[in-house]
Image: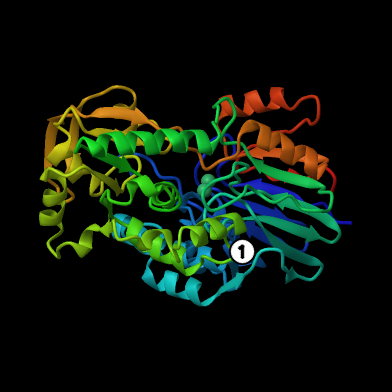
Amino acid sequence: MNDINVTAYGSTDYVGRSAFHLSDRDHNILLDCGIQLVPKQFSIAPKGVDSIASTLDAVLLSHAHIDHSGYMPSLSRNGYRGNYYMTHPTKEIAYRLWLDHLKIEGQRHWGESDLDRVFHKIRTLNYDKTFKLADGITARFLNAGHVLGAAQILIDWEGRLILYTGDINDRITPMFDGYDVPEEDIDILLIESTNGDRYVPERSKINVGLRLIAKQLTAENHKMILPSFAVGRSQETLITLALDDDLNDVPIYMDGMINVMNMITEHFLSEKWVSKRFLAQLKDAGLNSPFEKSNFIPVHSISERTHAARRYIARNTEGSIIVTTSGMLEGGPVHTYLELCGDREENVVGFTGYQVDGTLGRSIYDGERDITLDNGRGRKKNIVLKSKVMKFPYSGHSSVDGLKHMMQATNAKDIILIHGDKRNQEYILNYVKDIAQPRLIKEGVETKLLSA
Ligand SMILES: [Zn+2]
Ligand SMILES: [Zn+2]
């Protein structure tokens, strides 16, 4: 049998620009092709992908997040003419994120015509269905429990089973009941390692806190601003608020790309893509969609003049919740809300996601209150943030127990840690040492898979 090799073009001992090339003498397959977002700078492409694009037999995408999908359209520019395999929700979400990327960064990595070519070559698949990639090689998507449509990718390479987890979550979240584990034993496991030494509380505990604060604040006619990632976290936060009847009369404003993602989510509310438990909860609440409640208000529905609508929301005397982009405060409508009502001590800014070093979100999270805002039209403004800052420790990634469980349950012989920072990976290596000896690989170096 041929040796199988893996080459990582990014996301080895850090998070960003995931792109993993599996190859043997006759075949080349690419798993994910992301870009790394860097605060205040242009994004970074995975180095080395351009030169292999034309040799690829198949390209698979685990989920839409830009650190997994953002560089994919460049493959067509560099000579790849084959198919792109992903789930249907991932296609819908990725397309919106790709268009958004073009708006933000322009044609630095790829252009509109590349995107068109990719779009026509996308093949969408459901979870748990085996499909052919090349002679002797098949693949299957498994639910990852991470965001809508997110998949782990299981590859049968001439009888050897390789599981690439993409991003996985073991926790019960509003829409999912954690990742699935394949029934068969796995030979090689490429596993994310985002959370190592970070404690991830149960969602239900964080949700209790979020709902309590939301009720208290709004009862006193104050405002809670929740900067949220458009894909995933904002829907989860909104669902948590929607399923609490005590908040039925509290206006919940939704601003930014969140509204588009809500519509995509609504489209896929079926057993195929979300958990039965969640669908039953919706049914019990008499809802077809969590976002259809009359107190859930897309900001653009108030007025075509968005700034006027935001001013109205920020300055009126009602208690309300504002769920808005961007999640790390690197731009977006959240800046307008901070400018208009961040000077009031009674209001709360609540973080619902991880804040990367170098972002405005991170500096506020760490205690900075003299901040510079950007109104999106190039005008900067310095303010002193007086609103209270609260931290809700949500994570879209598996706890360290969940990672250990995956290693144990799959019985993998060769385990490679990817997509996590060094400190977390060291912690994980120590934490699992009684059941498994994972290894790390070097970026850009072709590495032989051990059981192959
Ligand atoms: Zn992700
Ligand atoms: Zn990721």
Residue at 38% in and 66% down = 111
Residue found at the far right of this picture: 1
- Decide if residue 74 is on the left or right side of residue 61: left
Q: Residues within 10 Å of mark 1 (few under 14, many from 20)?
A: many
* Badge count: 1
| Quadrant in the rendering for residue 350 | top left
113 to 391, vertically: above or below? below
Considering depth in this image, is 31 or 63 the residue closer to the camera?
A: 63
Considering depth in this image, is 91 or 132 the residue closer to the camera?
A: 91
Q: Please indicate, yes or no, whether residue 339 appears anywhere in the rendered image.
A: yes
Going by the numbered disc 1, the residue's amino acid type is Val
- Kindly state the secondary structure of the residue where label 1 is placed: strand
Q: Position of residue 259 (x, y in %)?
A: 33, 60
| Quadrant in the rendering for residue 12 | top right
Considering depth in this image, is 164 or 435 the residue closer to the camera?
A: 435
Q: Position of residue 1 (x, y in %)?
A: 89, 56
Q: Position of residue 294 (x, y in %)?
A: 30, 61
Q: Position of residue 252 (x, y in %)?
A: 28, 51
In the rendered image, which residue does mark 1 sit on? Answer: 59
380 to 90, vertically: above or below? above
| Quadrant in the rendering for residue 58 | bottom right
Q: Please indicate, yes or no, whether residue 107 appears anywhere in the rendered image.
A: no
Residue at 77% in and 64% down = 26
